[in-house]
Image (cartoon, rainbow, N blue to C red):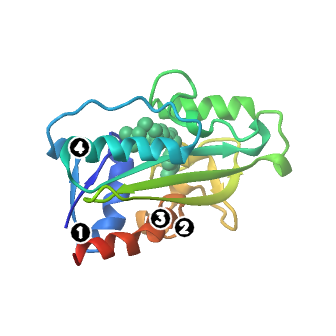
Amino acid sequence: MKLLLASRNAKKLRELKRIVAAEGIEVLGLDDVPEFPEAPETAPTFEGNALAKARDAHAATGLPAVADDSGIAVDALNGMPGVLSARWAGAHGDDAANLELVLGQLRDVPDERRGAAFVSAVAYVAADGSEVVVRGEWRGAIIREARGANGFGYDPIFRPDGLEVTSAELSAEEKDALSHRGKALRLLLPHLRGQSSR
Ligand SMILES: O=P(O)(O)OP(=O)(O)OP(=O)(O)OC[C@H]1O[C@@H](n2cnc3c(O)ncnc32)[C@H](O)[C@@H]1O
Ligand SMILES: [Mg+2]
């Protein structure tokens, strides 16, 4: 089966591909299909945005499509940046500015109240138009200074529960095994397998 992964974020796309391609599914990115209009990500939930992205991609191409909407929910910020994670500091996708802003906002927050969770909602619109949405979460804490060069986004300031390193200090395989996105995609894989045998 051919599967379209509808993300404009190259590093996120790489993570999605890593996990899905291991299933022997032929994966296409948005660069492999003709351009189509993409609705802005304005839903109040990760699930709503993920579905909107997957529906746009499926409607434009007729291909089965998967989209991820994700972000970091910080306890001391009442769950923000949340769905605003990609543009928390203003410009879309400025990872360094986004994480610096969160570090500044948490400067006076003591260690025991620095809990946070990465969240990923993954939506799948199958060739026949049927829809599935799954969600994965990864709990941890926001540290005080960025550390590590792997991953993307907020990884350098997120220390997963039970680990002494940030998610930007994990290998790709280690992150996939633990991450919000890994968890969500593993919930989705049975649905993808069901399709490929049709
Ligand atoms: O919408 P697409 O095109 O897929 O790409 P995007 O980068 O805009 O992605 P989102 O709208 O889902 O925004 C997610 C933001 O949350 C952050 N984020 C999501 N997953 C992350 C991860 O695994 N590690 C670090 N930061 C992550 C990262 O800053 C992203 O910009
Ligand atoms: Mg986005």
Q: Which residue is mark 3?
A: 182
Label 4 sits on what residue type?
Answer: Leu
Sequence-earlier tag: 4 or 1:
1
C-alpha gap between disc 4 and disc 1? 16 Å
Q: Amino acid at mark 2?
A: Leu
Circle 4/circle 3 CB separation < 8 Å: no
Residue 78 lies, in percent from the top left, at 76, 39
The residue drawn where x is 27% and y is 48% is: 58
Element assignment for label 2: helix
Label 3 amino acid? Gly
Name above or below for residue 49 compared with residue 178: above
Ligand 1 within 8 Å of the CB at mark 4: no
Tell me the crowding category of disc 1: few under 14, some 14 to 19, or many 20 or more residues within 10 angstroms, Cα based. Answer: some
Identity of the residue drawn at 46% across and 29% down:
94
In the shown orientation, is residue 164 left or right of residue 134?
Answer: right
Q: Which residue is mark 2?
A: 178
Q: Nearer the viewer, residue 114 or 118?
A: 118
| Mark identifier at residue 30 | 4
Residue holding disc 1: 25
Mark 3 touches mark 2? (CB < 8 Å): yes
Asked whether disc 1 touches disc 2, contact meaning CB atoms under 8 Å apart, the reply is no
Circle 1: residue type: Ile
Q: Gap in Å between the C-alphas at discs 1 and 3?
A: 16 Å
Q: Is residue 83 left or right of residue 189?
A: right
Q: Is residue 55 left or right of residue 97?
A: left
On-image quarter of the C terminus: bottom left
